[in-house]
Each structure stands twice: as structure tokens, then as C-alpha cells.
Amino acid sequence: METHRIELGGDGILRIANNPVDLTLDNIRPSLEYTQHVAKMRGGKIKIIIDPAKMKSMSKEARNESKQQLEKCTEALAVINRNPFVVFLFNLIMKEDKPGFPMRLFRDEKKAENWLKSV
């Protein structure tokens, strides 16, 4: 099973939605590689909306690898919150991992899009 659905919108925002899986270092790598490929094809860093609502769990190794790889290609990241686990993961990332790009939590995807277009 694929770990994510990934789509590049006409507005230049990459949208990532998790499938119902446990994210590990091994199964997250293809999505990270694809995200970096899209950024490179668009000339550098990209804006991303991620909806992790269906994600079951994420290993520490997968989280660390995501941070390292996303810092190379992310201009800003909006996270859609439709699950209590998302709030926990978001707070953990902001506290422990401190990403090197702007990152905000939203309940509404349209508000997330507007924020990304403003940064």
C-alpha cells in the first residue's frame, strides 16, 4: 500500500494526504524523494499542505528523516488538523524538531492555502 497521495496543484502547492498506514523510515522514503523531485523541477523550494488525518503512527526515524529532507525543499508547510493525533504530532515536531521553515496548523484547507500564498 502506498503511504501517501501526492498532487501538485495548479497554484504550485504540493498536497500530501496520508493513507492509513504506520509510517516508517523505509516506507516514507519514496514520498520524500518525490517531494524533492517536484521541488527541484519547480526551481527550488515548494509550499506544501499535508493532511495526516489517516496516519496511524510515525516512527521517530521517519520523523527525523522527514525533517532533514523537507528542510531541503520546503518553503512553508501547512498541516491540516482533523485528528487529535495530528495536534500531538504537530506539537512534538514544533518542540523537539524545530523545522527550518514556517509551519502552521489549520482546521480548514482553504485557510491553509491562503496562508501559504501569503508567505
Image (cartoon, rainbow, N blue to C red):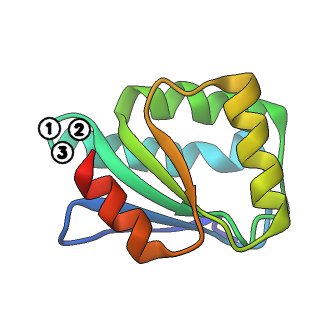
Q: Which amino acid does label 3 sit on?
A: Met
> What residue did someone put label 3 on?
41
Residue name at image x 29 percent, y 45 percent: 46
Residues under numbered marks 3 and 2 in contact, where contact means CB atoms less than 8 Å apart: yes
Query: Where residue 29 is drawn, which disc sits there?
Result: none
How crowded pointer 2 is (Cα within 10 Å; few <14, some 14-19, many 20+) is rated as some
C-alpha distance separating marks 3 and 2: 4 Å
Relative to residue 43, is residue 58 drawn left or right?
right
What element does badge 3 sit on?
Answer: helix
Query: Where residue 40 is drawn, which disc sits there?
Result: 2
Point out residue 49 in the picture as x, y percentages from the top left corner. 45, 60
Q: Where's the C terminus, which quadrant? A: top left
Q: What residue type is labelled 2?
A: Lys
Residue name at image x 66 percent, y 66 percent: 81
C-alpha distance separating marks 1 and 2: 5 Å
Residues under numbered marks 1 and 3 in contact, where contact means CB atoms less than 8 Å apart: yes
> What residue did someone put label 1 on?
43
Q: Which amino acid does label 1 sit on?
A: Gly
